Image: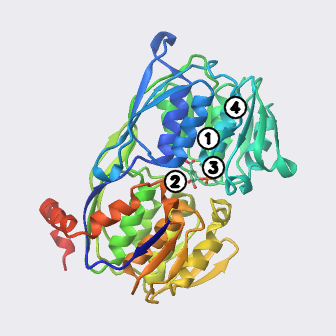
């Protein structure tokens, strides 16, 4: 599909977002192996489950292993309806051998987390994905799962999917992760639940910790101290939990960047998950000078949540590196848009992992934003972006990468002239209502809504 975008006069409104993709995957997977009290099958209800294709891939794979999972409402999120998933856990030994190859689609989280789970199961399984996923590195999970005792094979020296897994009889290991990857960490934790002995994981930098939090909430014996995690094997099944998934901060990031860059913007984004292992985008935008405020902070299901309000801002460049990278890894293409418009230079370093995402996001972000007039130099592990160049609407391509499609959409909202985005349907992977939400925020009705709902304590931002 092709999407054409021109800069709107204003960018205003209040939106709620589809559920967080990372938390939704985990809610489905962990509830699929959970039980009610006294080991009785219990339904878990997960509201605001991510409607994106990635989480649907996870649910489809779980169903292929005998898990009953039903969607109650799948109406478009832009109309205010959310997706609810009901899932009946099968306990520790309840999964069954899939009759066919499991298809993780475009989803790295599905493939890596499920491979960890499959490594613990005493049956044969094969898991594959689309062209992009079949080119992403898998040795990072194959090697430690083998050390735990699983038999796993893959293409090209066991480094690429499809992966063939014959699991069972695992033992815990002590493992220093070679990369700060929550997918790798979570794969090992899932395997560790069914191993004999403790699984001890050391991360080089803290990555998103949703798996640890949810495991704790479901009764697993897991301890975290900074980058050090200790997990004891299950002695009784996980407890099924009902959950409401917070709005996805990676989707909120689109409107935070768009709102900061547009000269007449005020956007309120409600119920966003602001887990500190994910909220790098907020800290970075604040340091760049964004008129961003965090309101109504609270906790739901062990995850911190807040409303975020962004208004037109004057941004300055900065260095983004070190501990900040895993906290903002999926938002770096959007931050490249912000940096291209900001005053001064932005340097992104230590982000080599961007090359192992749905596309090589250093190369694709640079290629596509450069077409729009951004001044970007590629580094092996990042980018140097010289800000201040006005963006010009041109033809550009998402490379079928959802994060890039949305970053280009945001660039189109502030570029001069018309921006044409090819393969714009890529947004369906994590945020299917992205283009509808854009329409809502660029329409006059959206502007009027916001004015009515603006809280009085935000007037200080109008200077
Ligand atoms: C995710 C972890 C990150 C992130 C991905 C989702 C997760 O990947 O980029 O979009 O849900 O665990 P890595 O763990 O490979 O860094």
Q: Disc 1 vs disc 4: Cβ atoms closer than 8 Å?
A: no
Q: How far apart are the alpha carbons under marks 2 and 3?
A: 11 Å
Name the residue furthest right: 157
Q: Hey, which quadrant is residue 265 in on the image?
A: bottom left
N-terminal of the pair, mark 1 or mark 4, is: 4
Q: Nearer the viewer, mark 2 or mark 1?
A: 2
The structure residue drawn at horizontal position 44% and vertical position 68%, both measured from the top left corner, is: 284
Q: Is residue 75 left or right of residue 389?
A: left
Q: Closer to the N terminus: mark 4 or mark 3?
A: 3
What's the image's color scheme? rainbow
CA separation in Å, label 1 and label 4: 13 Å
**Residue position marked by numbered label 3 in the rendering:** 108
- Classed neighbour count for the residue bearing mark 4: other residues with Cα under 10 Å, few (<14), some (14–19), many (≥20): many
Q: Residue shown at 63%/59% (left/top)?
A: 357
Q: Which residue is mark 4?
A: 118
Label 4 to label 2: alpha-carbon separation: 23 Å
Chain-order first, disc 2 or disc 3: 3
Circles 2 and 1 in contact, beta carbons < 8 Å: no
Within 10 Å of disc 2 (Cα), the crowding (few <14, some 14-19, many 20+) is many
Look at mark 1 in the image and give the residue it sits on: 186
From the image, state whether disc 4 or disc 2 is nearer to you.
2
Q: Is mark 3 within 8 Å of ligand 1?
A: yes
Could you give the CA–CA distance between mark 4 and mark 3, rounded to whole angstroms? 15 Å
Secondary structure beneath dot 4 equals: helix
Q: Quadrant of residue 124?
A: top right
Residue found at x 43% / y 22%: 43
């Amino acid at each position: 599909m092709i999407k054409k975008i021109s800069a709107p006069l204003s960018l205003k409104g209040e939106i709620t977002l589809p559920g967080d993709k990372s938390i939704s995957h985990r809610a489905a997977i962990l509830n699929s192996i959970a039980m009610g009290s006294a080991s009785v099958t219990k339904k878990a209800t997960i509201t605001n489950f991510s409607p994106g294709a990635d989480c649907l891939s996870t649910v489809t794979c779980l169903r292929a292993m005998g898990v009953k999972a039903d969607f109650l409402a799948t109406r478009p999120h832009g109309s205010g309806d959310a997706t609810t998933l009901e899932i009946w856990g099968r306990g520790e030994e309840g999964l069954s051998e899939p009759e066919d190859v499991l298809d993780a689609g475009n989803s790295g989280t599905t493939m890596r987390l499920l491979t960890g789970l499959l490594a613990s199961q005493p049956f044969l399984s094969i898991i594959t994905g689309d062209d992009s996923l079949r080119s992403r590195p898998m040795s990072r999970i194959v090697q430690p799962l083998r050390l735990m005792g699983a038999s796993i094979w893959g293409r090209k020296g066991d480094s690429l999917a499809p992966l063939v897994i014959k699991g069972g009889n695992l033992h815990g290991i002590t493992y220093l992760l070679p990369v700060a990857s929550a997918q790798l960490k979570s794969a090992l934790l899932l395997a560790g639940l069914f191993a004999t002995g403790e699984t001890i994981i050391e991360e080089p930098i803290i990555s998103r910790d949703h798996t640890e939090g949810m495991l704790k909430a479901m009764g697993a014996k897991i301890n975290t101290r900074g980058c050090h995690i200790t997990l004891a094997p299950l002695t009784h099944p996980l407890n099924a939990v009902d959950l409401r998934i917070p709005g996805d901060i990676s989707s909120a990031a689109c409107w935070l960047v768009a709102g900061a860059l547009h000269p007449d913007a005020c956007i309120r984004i409600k119920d966003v998950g602001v887990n500190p292992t994910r909220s790098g985008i907020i800290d970075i935008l604040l340091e760049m000078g964004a008129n961003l405020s965090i309101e109504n902070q609270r906790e739901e299901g062990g995850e911190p949540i807040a409303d975020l309000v962004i208004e037109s801002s004057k941004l300055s460049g900065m260095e983004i590196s070190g501990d900040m990278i895993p906290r903002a890894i999926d938002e770096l293409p959007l931050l490249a848009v912000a940096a291209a418009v900001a005053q001064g230079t932005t340097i992104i370093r230590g982000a080599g992992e961007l090359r192992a995402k749905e596309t090589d996001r250093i190369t694709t972000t640079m290629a596509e934003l450069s077409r729009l007039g951004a001044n970007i130099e590629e580094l092996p592990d990042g980018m140097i972006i010289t800000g201040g160049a006005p963006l010009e609407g041109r033809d550009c391509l998402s490379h079928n990468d959802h994060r890039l499609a949305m970053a280009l959409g945001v660039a189109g909202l502030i570029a001069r002239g018309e921006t044409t985005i090819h393969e714009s349907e890529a947004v369906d992977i994590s945020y299917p209502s992205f283009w509808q939400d854009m329409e809502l925020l660029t329409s006059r009705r959206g502007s009027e809504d916001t004015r009515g709902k603006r809280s009085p304590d935000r007037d200080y931002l109008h200077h």
